[in-house]
Image (tube, rainbow, N blue to C red):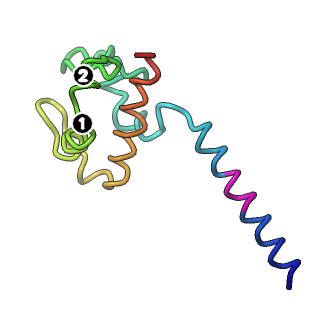
C-alpha cells in the first residue's frame, strides 16, 4: 500500500514537472495566434504585413499601446471585433481568447524589451 502511494506520487510529480517544462518552453507566438492573428498583426506583433498595413492593424510591440489597454478591453475587442478587426467570439472559446490576450498580445510587450 505504501509503495503504491509513493509510486503514484512520483508519477504525478513527474507529469506535473513535464507539464511545467512544456508550458515554460511554449513558443511565442502560439499556434493559435499564428492561425488567427498573424495575417494582420504579423508573427512578431508589429503589424508589418501587407494586410496589416492595408488595415492599419495595431502594432502590439508599442509600449504606449500596451500600457493604455487593459486585458478586459482587449478581450472584448477580440471577442466582438472593432474598427477593421473581425469578431472572433464565435470562432474561439473564451479561454482561447483570454490566452491570446494574456500570453500572446502581452508577450509582445515582454519580447520587445519595453
Question: In what quadrant of the picture does the N terminus appear?
Answer: bottom right
Residue 36 sits in quarter: top left
Q: Which residue is mark 2?
A: 65
Q: Residue furthest front?
A: 2
78 or 110, nearer to the observer: 110
Q: Residues within 10 Å of mark 2 (few under 14, many from 20)?
A: few
Residue at horizontal 67 percent and vertical 57 percent from the top? 16
> Taking 46 as reference, is 30 above or below it?
below
Question: In what quadrant of the picture does the C terminus appear?
Answer: top left
The boundaries of the magenta stretch are 13-18
Q: Secondary structure at mark 2?
A: helix
> Taking 84 as reference, is 8 above or below it?
below
Judged left or right of residue 39, residue 111 is right
In primary-sequence order, the first of circles 2 and 1 is 2
Judged left or right of residue 33, residue 11 is right
Residue at horizontal 84 percent and vertical 79 percent from the top? 4
Judged left or right of residue 6, residue 100 is left
Q: Which residue is mark 1?
A: 70
Q: Secondary structure at mark 1?
A: loop
Kindly report the secondary structure that dominates the magenta region of the rendered protein.
helix
Residue 43 location in percent, x, y? 43, 24
Q: How many marks?
A: 2
Amino acid at each position: 500500500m505504501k509503495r503504491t502511494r509513493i509510486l503514484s506520487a512520483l508519477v504525478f510529480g513527474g507529469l506535473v514537472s513535464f507539464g511545467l517544462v512544456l508550458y515554460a518552453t511554449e513558443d511565442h507566438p502560439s499556434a493559435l495566434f499564428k492561425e488567427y492573428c498573424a495575417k494582420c498583426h504579423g508573427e512578431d506583433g508589429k503589424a508589418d504585413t501587407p494586410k496589416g498595413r492595408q488595415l492599419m492593424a495595431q502594432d502590439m510591440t508599442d509600449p504606449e499601446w500596451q500600457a493604455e489597454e487593459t486585458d478586459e478591453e482587449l478581450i472584448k475587442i477580440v471577442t466582438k471585433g472593432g474598427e477593421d478587426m473581425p469578431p472572433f467570439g464565435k470562432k474561439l472559446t473564451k479561454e482561447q481568447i483570454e490566452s491570446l490576450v494574456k500570453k500572446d498580445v502581452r508577450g509582445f510587450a515582454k519580447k520587445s524589451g519595453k
